[in-house]
Image: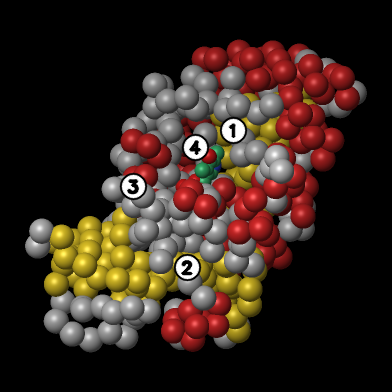
Amino acid sequence: MNIDYKALADKYGTPLYIYDFDYIENRYTTLKDAFTGKKSLISYAVKANSNLSVIAHLATLGAGADCVSIGEVKRALSAGVDKYKIIFSGVGKRDDEIRAALKYDILLLNLESEAEMKRVEMIAKELGKEARISVRVNPNIDPQTHPYISTGLHESKFGVEIDMAKRMYIYANKSDYLNPVGVHFHIGSQLIKLEPIKEACVIVADLVRSLKAIKIDIKFFDVGGGIGVVYNDEITISPKDYTQAIFEATKGLDVTLLCEPGRYMVANGGAFFTKVLYEKVNDGKRFVIVDGAMNDLLRPSLYNAYHEIEAVGIEGEKSIADVVGPVCESGDFFGKNVLLPPLKHNDLIVIHTAGAYGFTMASNYNTRAKSAEVALQNGKDRLIRKRETYEDQVRLELEYLEK
Ligand SMILES: *Cc1c(COP(=O)(O)O)cnc(C)c1O
């Protein structure tokens, strides 16, 4: 990215998220090209970055959407995603969410339990519809990633075991209101090793073969998301190796290959801008206090995640500092022991690789307004979300205020 950070920070103010749409486009086409020769659908995992303009940009390129709430399904539809490219996953779908998804006639509901399957059947019956479903299988593979974002082990709350999945498919196949057309797994996020994905593919492909043998024709083989990105010095999975592993495992199966990348698509295309408020030293320890905080970008606080922190255009002898926000929590930091030059009021700090799970995890903690979001495309910048105001935040409360 060749970007005039300072000009953007001056134009839109801080804290601020910026997303490079050309980069996102390149990520999508690189992955799509790696599927060449096979039927495939890339359904972008909206939870990584659900700004309508981001979803719309990917939809224009042909992407679908992987959603985990009816709100996300609505975002996808509003952004122009084809309804037959929308998938709805998640361990706890409410009745109203299931009903709406069936009415919208999206491609697939991913079922995560037998109890949920029965609810979907009941609601489909009520609506006189046949629900297209897939079952999220838990292949019991250690994805070798952070435990908070690992989802494919038996002790995790996600999906069902293979034997249960089989029973669910047999049940669904007999039901007048369920049409089992897909199989799904998602073993974790920020996966940088291919082996766990390969193993999961092999296990789930075997399941599909055994289902086809009893005339349950699975048409969509969904490998979930999880492709890791480079935050620091990780060596991660290449799209070509990824698809080769999937091709190998599914050899001979007539299926459409589906995948649901979130982070891969947007993480490195985004940055978070924040300005220095003050420097201080407590008991010999240097702190840089900035105007962004954990309510804007939670990953460092939540996962102890690393993000590269750059002081834009500042020279001088570097020393280590903790970069912290103004929120009243000790966990409110962006980086610890970061090498930084001497900084003064209004110097610009850019926090890299913030395009995924950044804004979508933002909150109003401490009655802080959410940042604005800006898109960069073809050398131009444009606002894609206004900075929130105090009035936006209290809008749903004011009328109840007793005078
Ligand atoms: C979160 C999630 C994804 C996306 O994960 P990434 O690591 O961002 O690629 C895909 N599928 C499901 C079911 C998810 O829950």
> Alpha carbon of mark 4 to alpha carbon of mark 3: how far?
33 Å
Kindly identify which residue carries mark 4. Answer: 186
- Residue, x 65% and y 20% (percent of image)? 116
Q: Are marks 2 and 1 in contact (CB under 8 Å)?
A: no
Residue beneath label 1, please? 90
Spatial separation of the CA atoms under disc 1 and disc 4: 11 Å
> Along the polypeptide, which appears first: circle 1 or circle 3?
1
Distance in Å between CA atoms under marks 2 and 1: 31 Å
**Residue under circle 3?**
329
Q: Amino acid at mark 1?
A: Gly
Q: Earlier in the sequence, mark 3 or mark 2?
A: 2
Q: How is the image coloured?
A: secondary structure
Kindly give the residue lying farthest to the left in the view shown. Answer: 284
Of labels 2 and 1, the one closer to you: 2
Look at the numbered discs 3 and 2 and tell me whether their residues touch, using CB distance below 8 Å. Answer: no
Q: Residue furthest front?
A: 403
Q: Secondary structure at mark 4?
A: loop
Instruction: Specify the label residue 15 is tagged with.
Output: 2
User: Does residue 16 show up?
Assistant: yes
The mark nearer the N terminus, 4 or 3, is 4
Q: CA distance from mark 2 to mark 4?
A: 33 Å
Q: Position of residue 164 (x, y in %)?
A: 55, 15
Sort mark 1 into few (<14), some (14-19) or many (20+) by Cα contacts within 10 Å.
some
Q: Nearer the viewer, residue 335 or 291?
A: 291
Query: Would you say the beta carbon of the disc 4 residue lies within 8 angstroms of ligand 1?
Result: yes
Front residue (pair 253, 266): 266
Q: Nearer the viewer, mark 1 or mark 3?
A: 3
> Is disc 1 in contact with disc 3, using a CB cutoff of under 8 Å?
no
